[in-house]
Amino acid sequence: MDHSAPRFAPPPFARRLLTTARSTRFRLERTAAGRVRGPAGRAGTLLAPVHLSLRDSRTLNVALAAPHGPGRARLLITRGPRRIAVPLTYEPHTGATPLLTATVTLRGMRDGVWRLTVETRDADGRVRRYGLAPADSGTPPATPTAPHAPDPRTGTLVRVVRARSGRAVLQATRSRPRAELVRFVPSGDGITVYGRLVAGGPPGAAEAVRRRDGVVVPAEVEWEGAAFALRVPLAAMAGAGPGQWVWDFRVGRLPVGRWLTDVRDPSAAYPTPFRVHALPGGALVRAHAHFTRTGAFAVTCWDITDAVRESDAPRDLAEETS
């Protein structure tokens, strides 16, 4: 396969049109999913959960006071004809209100808004359905992590949001293609970046792009399915011009970075030191592989070969004359 073939992104007006269409669809779906029917539909009451949360857009945790005594109960997660039924466990507590609880791993959540409904069936076979209100968590504390994180495998972001009616719904937003960095490994003679493509990104050539002036140098990359190993071209980067420069990286025209995370500031959460690398050609390069505040992977580098030689020259002369 020729991974170097050019690929064309849609023009800006087309991207804006797609974004507007998606926002409009989400708004309409939130209105439909959040609609609270009257008493005849038996879904007019909203239950206030004790706990309602999502972890990494995959694990849904819910606990609510049991509206009736022991009986069969389940949580229905629906979008159009699609339905996910999750059994709710009745948990009696001494001196406290009995709870209905469930923990479920969400799979195959397609782009859109999903309705949450609690369905109970008592001993007489009577079925009742209730909507869920969002958990009242108050003002979220200021923490290093965001309240939501995308699925690290697929990149899909699932959030609990409030519809206009006050009902809690799940909103799933698929990820655009990304080049997700898994780790980078500095060594004595260079830096290797390991990552993977997410959400159907196409394999392609890799390159380093110098900031401010956009100078591009190719980078060696090896593929194994959607996983890639990129060798940072320190020699070409340092030889592209004198001085210290910052370089970003692209794989298949996608910027490389740690995107699928809930860390607000990766540059502060993952501090990294400067290192000196002795390249096979004999050059010495001072490099700083790091993350930016937005999560992009970047390398600051500077060829210090001449500076080291000049600093060593007086020392060598002193040793010869002593």
Image: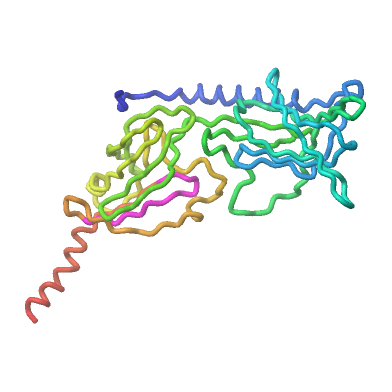
Q: Percent x, y for residue 276? A: 28, 58
Q: Percent x, y for residue 149? A: 59, 41
Between residues 306 and 78, which one lies in front from this camera angle? Answer: 78
- Examine the rendered structure and indicate whether residue 307 appears above or below residue 17: below
Q: Quadrant of residue 147?
A: top right
Q: Name the colour scheme.
A: rainbow
In the displayed structure, does residue 98 sit left or right of residue 75? right
Q: Residue furthest front?
A: 123
Check residue 66 for magenta coloring: no
Q: Residue furthest bottom?
A: 322
Q: Percent x, y for residue 222? A: 31, 35
The magenta-colored residue range is: 284-297
Q: Residue furthest left?
A: 321
Q: Percent x, y for residue 46? A: 84, 34
The image shows a total of numbered marks equal to 0
Between residues 171 and 59, which one lies in front from this camera angle? Answer: 59
Query: Magenta stretch mostly in which secondary structure?
Result: strand
Question: Measuring 53% from the left and 51% from the top, which residue is drawn there?
Answer: 265
Q: In the rendered image, which quarter contains the C terminus?
A: bottom left
Between residues 51 and 14, which one lies in front from this camera angle? Answer: 51
- Examine the rendered structure and indicate whether residue 80 appears above or below residue 301: above
Question: Measuring 65% from the left and 24% from the top, which residue is drawn there?
Answer: 24
Q: Quadrant of residue 2?
A: top left
In the displayed structure, does residue 168 sit left or right of residue 264? right
Question: Measuring 77% from the left and 28% from the top, which residue is drawn there?
Answer: 34
Q: In the rendered image, which quarter contains the N terminus?
A: top left
In the displayed structure, does residue 254 sit left or right of residue 43? left
Question: Measuring 41% from the left and 32% from the top, which residue is drawn there?
Answer: 226
